[in-house]
Amino acid sequence: MQAPSLYIVSDSPVHRADARAKLVLLLVYSVGLLFVGTWWGMAVAAALLSGAFVAARLPVRPVFLVPAPAYVLVAVTVAFNAFSYGPDAGMAFSAAGLSRGCLIGVRICLLVWASLIVCYATTSTQLVAAFLWFLRPLRAVRVPVDDVAMALSIALRFIPLIAVEYDQIRDAQWARGAAFDEGGPVRRIRAHVAILLPLIVGLFRRADRLAEAMDARCHGLKK
């Protein structure tokens, strides 16, 4: 069975743009987010992301609803920043920590959404070719650029498989009575552990089978 692809077919300007330009813009956007420390700056970054999303003409669910594990990470980040432990006061709530945690959480979400927009608007072949073009000068210092590009291609192939397996495990756990949308944040995070553990184990199994298949085909053997 053919592996699912992240690419969503569309005739938008973002889809038609060169993959190298999209990667450069994503890099600039990601680095810029790391230096944004105010809510006004985050609002500008969110506006830029909204413009790219509208221009890409992508559906809402793949971009904003699929990356559920990232939202779990955001919830943990906000919780750890909102509550601080002191030797005298014990566990105490901090409004400044909550604001800092929310700012970090928004930054994580914007990074994930921007990366997904690029992945959904660019085929894996175009992404690998763009990375190979950027890494081409490293051949002068004998860096195995082709091997790096192949590793990237495999990693991109695993991303949609992870999303599919996540949905399958979540549906299976839900059928067994697991509740992922009930209770407070801590209870919801604990409920998602029943998804993440089988998902991680499955990824290691896939990686092991892939390594055995590549070894059986004598990959990397020098002539």
Image (cartoon, rainbow, N blue to C red):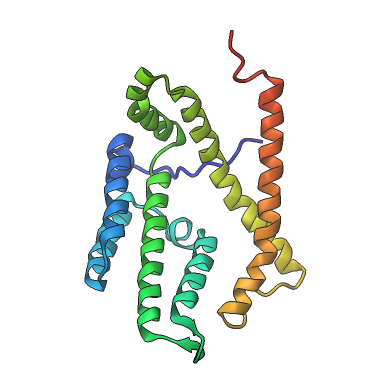
State left or right for residue 35 relative to residue 188: left
* Above or below for 39 versus 125: below
The image shows residue 25 at horizontal and vertical percentages of 27, 45
Residue reaching furthest to the top = 223
The image shows residue 114 at horizontal and vertical percentages of 36, 53
* Above or below for 149 versus 121: above
State left or right for residue 77 relative to residue 118: right
Residue reaching furthest to the bottom = 89
- Taking depth in this image into account, of 34 and 199 the one nearest to the observer is 34
- Taking depth in this image into account, of 100 and 198 the one nearest to the observer is 100
Examine the image and state in which quarter residue 99 appears. bottom left
Examine the image and state in which quarter residue 170 appears. bottom right
Q: Is residue 170 visible?
A: no
Q: Is residue 213 visible?
A: yes
The number of numbered discs placed on residues in the rendered structure image is: 0
At a point 42% along the width and 56% down the height, the residue shown is 112
The C terminus - image quarter? top right
At a point 62% along the width and 35% down the height, the residue shown is 2
The image shows residue 50 at horizontal and vertical percentages of 29, 60
The image shows residue 65 at horizontal and vertical percentages of 49, 63
The N terminus - image quarter? top right
At a point 60% along the width and 45% down the height, the residue shown is 161
- Taking depth in this image into account, of 117 and 223 the one nearest to the observer is 223
Residue reaching furthest to the right = 176
* Above or below for 54 versus 96: above
At a point 43% along the width and 31% down the height, the residue shown is 128
